Amino acid sequence: MDKREAILARLAALCTAISGIVSAQRNVLDVPYLQRPAVVVQDGSEERLDSPASATRSTAQRMELSPQLWLLVRGSGAEAGALLSLYRSRIVQAVLTDTTLQDLTGTAGGIRYEGCNVPEPTPESKEPRLDLNFTLTYTLRLSDLEG
């Protein structure tokens, strides 16, 4: 089982289960208005953190996966700001306490919430979006990859 894919799939499934979230999707640029509030899981980057100092260096290494979760809501102004804050809290709590994600990262890994930002709305959508940043550290083993 590829842990990277398992983690990303779990993030999408977890967000779908959050109270009030209508849909969660991966790697899309937008979600239709009526399917909001929604979370888009962007796969993000994966980088090697370190490798064990042994002959098995190429078969096991710790990786950092940095997906970004986009929170899309309906509304504008103060109403949208309150909704972004509400769902931010629910998402952060769900991700940091999920036992499946904890099992996937293992005892040598972990889950960190790195913070969030609200990018300027695009002229087309004029809708607010909150980008939540997480880093998940896990052990990549060649034996876990399908070949």
Image (tube, rainbow, N blue to C red):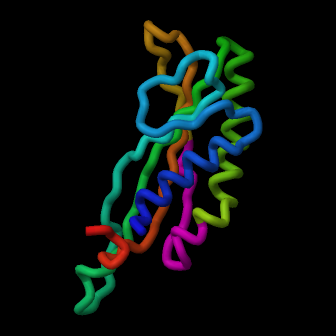
Quadrant for residue 52, please give it: bottom left
Q: Is residue 44 left or right of residue 90?
A: left
Q: Is residue 28 above or below residue 105?
A: above
Name the residue located 28 percent from the left edge and 81 percent from the top edge: 59
Q: Is residue 103 magenta?
A: yes
Q: Quadrant of residue 47?
A: bottom left
- Residue 134 place in picture, x, y as percent: 51, 51
Q: Image quadrant for the N terminus?
A: bottom left
For the point 61% across and 33% down, which residue is it?
Answer: 23
Residue farthest to the top, as pictured: 123
State whether residue 54 is above or below residue 99.
Answer: below
Q: Position of residue 67 (x, y in %)?
A: 45, 48
> Residue 144 location, x and y as percent?
37, 74
Residue at 31%, 66% (x, y): give it. Answer: 48
Between 106 and 100, which is closer to the camera in this rendering?
A: 100
Instruction: Report the number of numbered marks.
Output: 0
Which segment is the magenta one? 102-115
Seen at 68% across and 19% down, the residue is 80
Q: Is residue 102 above or below residue 8?
A: below
